[in-house]
Image (spheres, rainbow, N blue to C red):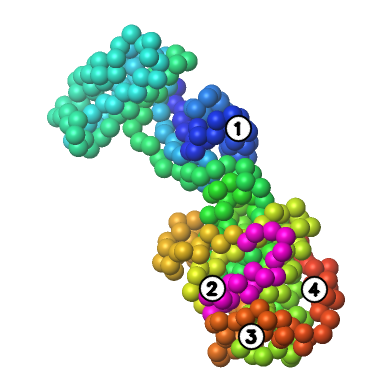
Amino acid sequence: MSKVIVIRYSELYLKGKNRNFFEKLLIDNIKSSLNGIDCKLKFNRSRYEVYDFSDESEIVERLKKVFGIHSISIATKCDYEIENIIAAVSDIRLSGTFKVDTNRADKTYPLISTEVSARAGAEILKNNPGLKVDVHRPMNVINIDIREDGCAYIFKDRIACAGGMPVGSSGKGLLLLSGGLDSPVAGYMMAKRGMRLDAIHFHSYPYTSEKAKQKVIDLAKILVDYTGPITLHCIPFTKIQEEIHKNCASNYMITIVRRFMMRIAERVAALSGCGCLVNGESLGQVASQTLESITVTNDMVKSMPIFRPCIGMDKQEIVDISVKIKTYDTSILPYEDCCTVFLPDSPVTKPTIRRAEREEKRMGDFESLIAEAIGNQEIIHIEKV
């Protein structure tokens, strides 16, 4: 009899012939997540377990952030003979009401599920005076999972985990990480669908401070618990913004800024082996996120898709996720980002591609500015602590 943590995976059972690929990724991600913790791991088809551990709470907190895991349980493991199951439940102490729920994966087991539940329930009742059975709305549920390999797991709670797909199963994308609430949530949402992420941040020193850049680095450090290592590309954007401010109509400045960001992000993504861009835009939230504005900025990206996982969310939904993943407190720190530099009083909400191109022509040959920004980028590699 031993104490283990049982790991159940999420959508992987739907993957058919490709299942081994997804399982291997998930196993590698679990091992990476538990790196540095004294424990052992065992991987069987559809049931993984952690054993010989001491720091139970830390293991649970780390596993809850691994995409691809549906739930975990802290369980007692024993040989599946009924006498061993009865011995395992004899130490359980409960109050109020309860029921025993048995899953008999091994259909050759000599007792049916209701018989196992009845015998285990009788033992629990014997050791808990005042406890009552309620099969409809019990305060406590004791689960018995009888497996094909000759073992049984006895546990009370199923701890919900991140779900989704193992990170690395859906390619790699480049996240436009601004420092606000939305973009970290967008990164989290794409990682949940199995996407590995790098990130790009545009800063306009001295108009924006070093604290604004550090804020983005801190956000990336929070995200790596979910996404794995992130390479952060910090792009100096000051000269480009000054040229936009000097040459372009003020109401089109935000639109032109976004177009230049997309130009640069696409090139950095291609150089970094990323197959898409990811941003935190939510339809209609600000002037640069109207249908027309998104169309005009999309026009800059020719070789890859742009994913916007927050596009249909309202602000409260985004806030709720940011609180859950612990980026909220950092995102709301009052350090400006480059989109606030030279901010016009009345930005255009229905720009056109033709007008945006006309405004950009006023800047002359801007390719050297783009090349200089990419050439002077600072690359920061952010790993799990």
Query: Could you tell me which residue is drawn at 59 percent across and 72 percent down?
Result: 294
Q: Name the residue under label 2.
A: 291
**Distance from Cα at disc 1 to Cα at disc 4:** 41 Å
Label 3–label 2 contact, CB within 8 A: no
Q: Which residue is drawn at 48% across and 61% down?
A: 322
In the rendered structure, the answer to whether residue 316 lies left or right of residue 178 reads left
Amino acid type at mark 1: Asn
**Compared to 9, does 108 lie above or below?**
above
Q: Picture quarter containing residue 156?
A: top left
Q: Which label's residue is closer to the chain start, 3 or 4?
A: 3
| Of the two numbered discs 3 and 2 in the rendering, the one whose residue sits closer to the viewer | 2
Q: Which amino acid does label 2 sit on?
A: Leu
**Label 1 vs 4, first from the N-terminus:** 1
Disc number for residue 252: 3
Left-right relation of 60 to 308? left
- Report the residue marked by disc 4: 370
According to the picture, the residue beneath numbered tag 1 turns out to be 18
